[in-house]
Image (cartoon, coloured by chain):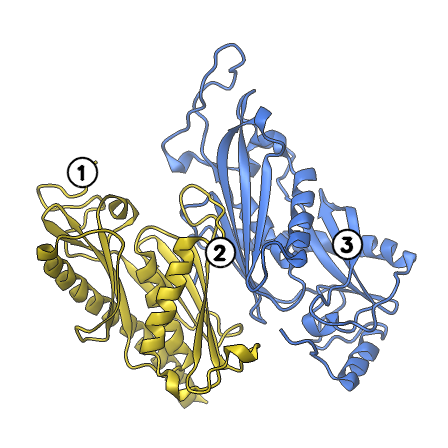
C-alpha cells in the first residue's frame, strides 16, 4: 500500500479539476456517477444468499448470508455482521470501523419482524463480508454487495405450526428447497424488501462527488458517508477522511450547507442506484459459478 | 452411513478411482494481482492471488540468494455448513500455510528471483474435503498465470483407505471417517513434492493408496494443463489480432 499516490503537481491539478463547476473527474464521470461494476449472485451453494461485486480497478467483495434458527429471547439482535479485509488484522481500527458502520446500519434498519418464525423462534442472519482487494474506501462496495446478497437470500419454508405459545414445538421446515422464499416474499402487499445501503461522497470545494476513486480520495477536503433506506436518506450521516492509507493534507472542516446538499443529492440519485442493483439481480443468470 | 457400498459405489455415486468434478480458471483477477486462479474440486472452492516477485516491504524478508514465498491463508467463516468464526493463528491453518510454503519453495525456481518476495493470498470460499489439495492446485495455476518459473505443475489430490479398498479424492464426509493421505505430484512424474498423512494407514496398504493418488494427480494435472492452454490460446489470438 503506497503512502504517496500522487505527486504535488498531480494533486494540485486534480484538486483544481474537481473544484470546477461542474467538477472534471479523471475518469470523466459526472458528479453523481458510480464507477462501473460487475456482479454475480447466488454462487455459494452452502449459503442462503451470496453476492460478489468487482470494480474495474480490481476491488472485490464477496458477501455470504447464512441463517440459523435461534430462540429469539436469547439473542440481542437477529443480525450479525462480520468483515474480513485482506491484508488487515481483524482487530485493526480500519476493520472494526467498517464492521461497526455495517452492523449499526443493518441492526437499526431491517424488517426483522419478518425473520420471526413463531413466538419463540426466529431466523438469525449471519452476514459475512470478505474484501479480497480494495483501493478506495470499501464501505460502499461492502454495502452494495450486502444489498445484493440480502435480496437474493432464500429462507426455507416453515411447515410446522406458527402458534407455539401453548405447545412447545420445534419449528420444522419443508425439505424442498424450491419452496424456499426470498425475504421479500414474506412482506405484505405494497411493501418491498429494500435493505439499507451506504454511499460515500467526497467533499471538495463547493462540490460533492459520488463514489470517489483512490486518486480523488487523496485530494478531498472531507468525506461523507450517507445511509439510504426506505427511499430516503436516513441517519447516521457521518464524515470521515476517506484517504485512510495516506496523509491527506487538504483535509479540513465541513461546511454545514454541504450536509443538506448531500442529503438532497442522496434522495435524488440513490433510488437509481437501488434500481440498478435490482435490475442486476433480475438479469443475473442462475448458473451457479462465479467466474 | 455406508461410505462404500458392496456394489462399489460411494456416497456421491462415484467409484473408488473417480475424482470429483474439477473446474479451474486462471487469470480471474487480472486487475488486482499478477497471477490469479479459481478452482472448484467438488464443493471445495478456492480463490488464489499471487503478487510478485516483488521487492519485500521489510528488509528482513529479503534473501540474497533466492525468492521468499509467503502464503496467506484466509478461510471464510461461511465456508463450512455450520458457520464458524476462525482465527488465522489456528494450529491447523499455520501448519497448512507452512506446508504450502515449503512445497512451493522447492517447486518454484526461487534462485532466479533473489531479494524478492512472492506473496500468495488464498481465500477459501467453501470446503468439502481435500482442502490442502485444492489450495496446492490453486497456487500452481496462479503461479503459472503470474509467469513465475517453475519446474513443473504441482498437482495434488487426496486418497484414503476404507477397510481394504483405497478411495480417490475424498469429500468432506468421507474425510471425517477414514485416514486421508494428501499428495502433490510434480508434473507427469512419480515424484512427490507434498505428502501429508494426519493419521495412520497400514504400511502394506500404503502402496495401493499412493498408486491411485498418483494416477489421480496426473488426471488433475491434465485438467489444469487444458485450462492453461485454453487461456494461452485466447491470449495469443488477441496478440495476433492486434
Nearer to us of marks 2 and 1 is: 2
Q: Position of residue A128 (x, y in %)?
A: 54, 49
Q: Position of residue A182 (x, y in %)?
A: 51, 39
Q: CA distance from mark 3 to mark 2?
A: 39 Å
Q: CA distance from mark 2 to mark 1?
A: 35 Å
Q: Are tags 1 and 3 found on a single chain?
A: no
Q: Position of residue B57 (x, y in %)?
A: 57, 77
Nearer to us of marks 3 and 2 is: 2
Residue A153 as seen in the image, left or right of residue A235: left
Q: Which residue is mark 3?
A: A266
Q: Which residue is mark 1?
A: B2
Nearer to us of marks 1 and 3 is: 1
Q: Chain of mark 1?
A: B
Other residues around mark 1 within 10 Å, as few (<14) / some (14–19) / many (≥20): few
Checking the image for residue B88, the label placed there is 2
Residue in the image at 28% along x and 72% along y = B154
Q: Are tags 3 and 2 found on a single chain?
A: no
Where disc 1 sits, the SS reads loop
Amino acid at each position: 500500500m503506497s503512502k504517496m499516490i500522487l505527486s504535488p503537481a498531480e494533486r494540485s491539478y486534480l484538486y483544481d479539476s474537481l473544484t470546477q463547476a461542474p467538477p472534471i473527474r479523471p475518469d470523466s464521470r459526472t458528479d453523481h456517477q458510480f464507477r462501473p461494476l460487475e456482479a454475480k449472485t447466488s454462487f455459494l451453494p452452502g449459503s442462503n444468499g451470496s453476492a460478489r461485486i468487482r470494480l474495474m480497478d480490481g476491488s472485490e467483495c464477496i458477501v455470504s448470508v447464512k441463517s440459523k434458527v435461534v430462540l429469539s429471547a436469547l439473542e440481542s439482535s437477529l443480525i450479525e455482521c462480520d468483515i474480513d479485509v485482506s491484508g488487515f488484522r481483524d482487530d485493526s481500527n480500519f476493520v472494526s470501523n467498517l464492521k461497526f458502520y455495517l452492523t449499526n446500519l443493518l441492526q437499526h434498519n431491517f424488517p426483522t419482524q419478518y425473520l420471526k418464525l413463531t413466538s419463540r423462534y426466529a431466523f438469525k442472519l449471519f452476514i459475512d463480508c470478505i474484501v479480497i482487494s480494495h483501493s478506495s474506501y470499501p464501505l460502499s462496495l461492502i454495502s452494495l454487495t450486502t444489498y445484493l446478497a440480502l435480496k437474493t437470500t432464500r429462507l426455507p419454508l416453515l411447515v410446522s405450526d406458527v402458534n407455539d405459545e401453548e405447545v412447545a414445538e420445534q419449528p420444522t421446515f419443508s425439505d424442498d428447497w424450491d419452496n424456499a422464499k426470498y425475504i421479500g416474499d414474506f412482506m405484505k402487499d405494497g411493501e418491498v424488501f429494500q435493505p439499507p445501503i451506504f454511499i460515500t461522497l467526497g467533499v471538495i470545494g463547493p462540490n460533492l462527488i459520488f463514489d470517489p476513486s483512490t486518486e480523488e480520495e487523496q485530494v478531498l477536503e472531507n468525506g461523507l458517508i450517507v445511509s439510504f433506506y426506505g427511499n430516503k436518506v436516513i441517519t447516521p450521516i457521518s464524515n470521515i477522511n476517506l484517504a485512510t492509507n495516506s496523509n491527506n493534507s487538504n483535509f479540513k472542516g465541513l461546511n454545514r450547507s454541504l450536509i443538506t446538499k448531500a442529503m438532497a443529492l442522496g434522495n435524488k440519485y440513490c433510488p437509481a442506484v437501488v434500481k440498478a442493483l435490482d435490475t442486476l439481480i433480475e438479469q443475473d443468470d442462475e448458473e451457479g459459478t462465479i467466474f | 452411513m455406508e461410505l462404500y457400498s458392496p456394489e462399489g459405489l460411494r456416497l456421491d455415486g462415484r467409484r473408488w478411482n473417480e475424482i470429483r468434478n474439477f473446474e479451474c480458471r486462471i487469470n480471474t483477477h487480472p486487475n488486482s494481482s499478477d497471477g490469479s486462479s479459481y478452482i472448484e474440486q467438488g464443493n471445495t472452492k478456492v480463490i488464489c492471488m499471487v503478487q510478485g516477485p516483488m521487492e519485500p516491504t521489510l528488509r528482513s524478508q529479503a534473501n540474497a540468494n533466492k525468492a521468499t514465498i509467503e502464503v496467506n491463508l484466509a478461510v471464510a467463516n461461511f465456508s463450512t455448513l455450520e458457520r464458524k468464526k476462525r482465527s488465522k493463528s489456528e494450529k491447523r491453518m499455520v501448519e497448512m500455510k507452512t506446508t504450502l510454503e515449503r512445497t512451493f519453495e522447492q517447486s518454484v525456481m526461487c534462485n532466479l528471483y533473489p531479494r524478492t518476495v512472492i506473496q500468495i493470498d488464498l481465500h477459501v470460499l467453501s470446503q468439502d474435503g481435500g482442502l490442502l489439495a485444492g489450495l496446492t492446485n490453486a497456487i500452481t495455476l496462479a503461479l503459472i498465470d503470474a509467469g513465475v518459473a517453475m519446474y513443473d505443475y504441482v498437482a495434488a489430490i487426496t486418497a484414503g483407505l476404507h477397510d481394504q479398498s483405497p478411495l480417490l479424492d475424498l469429500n468432506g464426509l468421507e474425510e471425517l471417517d477414514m485416514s486421508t493421505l494428501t499428495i502433490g505430484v510434480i508434473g507427469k512424474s512419480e515424484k512427490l513434492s507434498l505428502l501429508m498423512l494426519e493419521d495412520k494407514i497400514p504400511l502394506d496398504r500404503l502402496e495401493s493408496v499412493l498408486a491411485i493418488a498418483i494416477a489421480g494427480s496426473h488426471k488433475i494435472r491434465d485438467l489444469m494443463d487444458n485450462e492453461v492452454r485454453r487461456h494461452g490460446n485466447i491470449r495469443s489470438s488477441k496478440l495476433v489480432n492486434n
